[in-house]
Amino acid sequence: MKILAAADYQPALLALFDRSAAALRALLPQARVEHVGASSIPGASSKGDLDIAVIVPPEAHAQAVARLGEAGFQIKTDTLRTPALCMLLAPGDWSEGHDLALQVIASGSAFEDFLVFRDALRADPALVAAYDEVKRRHAGAGEDAYRTAKARFIESVLARSGDCL
């Protein structure tokens, strides 16, 4: 897998986030839509994908997932799924040729840690550099090894703030 420098992917994904967020807010007016993942962190390297957290009231979670399914989003297989978290992949007309994933999150759940992690990296350039190093070092090790290394790093950052996934 190829890891891209921020300048090679962030401008396009920031614009795609803005368009997607507006469409998601129209589709789910009760949702809070947040840019998460590496593309939301200035200067971070990435695979060039876009992650969006769609945060809804717990009682609206299942309905939000269903509404997004009606709009063409597909449940992402081989990921954690709970009554408070569902990962979805965007259809082509939404993603504009990029990998675009939604994390539909019940507000108040532990899964709001996507925001905690993002904010920790936004506040600390040294953490961004360390995260980039983890990604570069494991990019050629296969998807499972890459995800495992990233997960360990994320857990270490969240443990600093008293949170964990």
Image (spheres, rainbow, N blue to C red):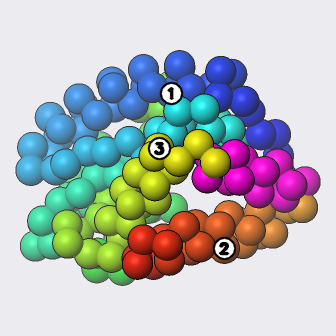
For the residue marked with disc 3, what is the amino acid? Arg
Residue 72 seen anywhere in this rendered image of the structure = no
Crowding around mark 2 (Cα neighbors within 10 Å: few <14, some 14 to 19, many 20+) is few
Residue 162 seen anywhere in this rendered image of the structure = yes
Name the residue that disc number 3 marks: 122
Circle number at residue 165: none
Image point (56%, 74%), residue name: 155
Taking the image as shown, residue 92 lies to the left or right of residue 103, namely: right
Crowding around mark 3 (Cα neighbors within 10 Å: few <14, some 14 to 19, many 20+) is some
Distance CA(mark 3)–CA(mark 2): 19 Å
Distance CA(mark 1)–CA(mark 2): 26 Å
Taking the image as shown, residue 93 lies to the left or right of residue 39, namely: left
Name the residue that disc number 2 marks: 152
Residue 33 position in % (x across, y down):
26, 44
Regarding mark 2 in the picture, which secondary structure is present there? Answer: helix
Magenta stretch: includes residue 131: yes
